[in-house]
Amino acid sequence: MTPEQTEQLEAAAFRSLVAHLRERTDVQNIDLMNLAGFCRNCLSRWYQEAAAERSIPLTQDEARERVYGMPYGEWKAKHQK
């Protein structure tokens, strides 16, 4: 497999994970942290760090919106217990 193919597959897997987490709003971040050691906020932080490494400007709020599928405050109001 070429490096480009590897990157494409990794990106597709990440998009699938994010889509799954967007659908599973019943799973709280604390549950993810306790069971898996990461949560949606971790993913958004890693996303923002990857952007920074590539000199792509991206705020914390913008990164969270890409992971949550909506502004973080809106997601919290709708889904956080």
Image: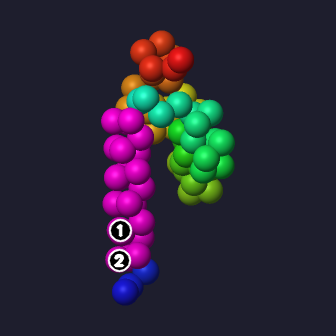
Residue 55 visible (yes or no): no
Q: Secondary structure at mark 1?
A: helix
- Crowding around mark 1 (Cα neighbors within 10 Å: few <14, some 14 to 19, many 20+) is few
The residue closer to the viewer here, 44 or 77, is: 77
User: Residue 13 location in percent, x, y?
Assistant: 38, 60
Would residue 80 be counted in the magenta stretch?
no
User: Residue 16 location in percent, x, y?
Assistant: 34, 52
Is the stretch drawn in magenta largely helix, strand or loop? Answer: helix
Alpha-carbon distance for marks 1 and 2? 5 Å
Which residue appears at 65% of the width and 49% of the height? Answer: 37
What amino acid does circle 1 point to?
A: Gln
Quadrant of image for the N terminus? bottom left
The residue under label 2 is 5
What amino acid does circle 2 point to?
A: Gln
Would residue 9 be counted in the magenta stretch?
yes
The residue under label 1 is 8
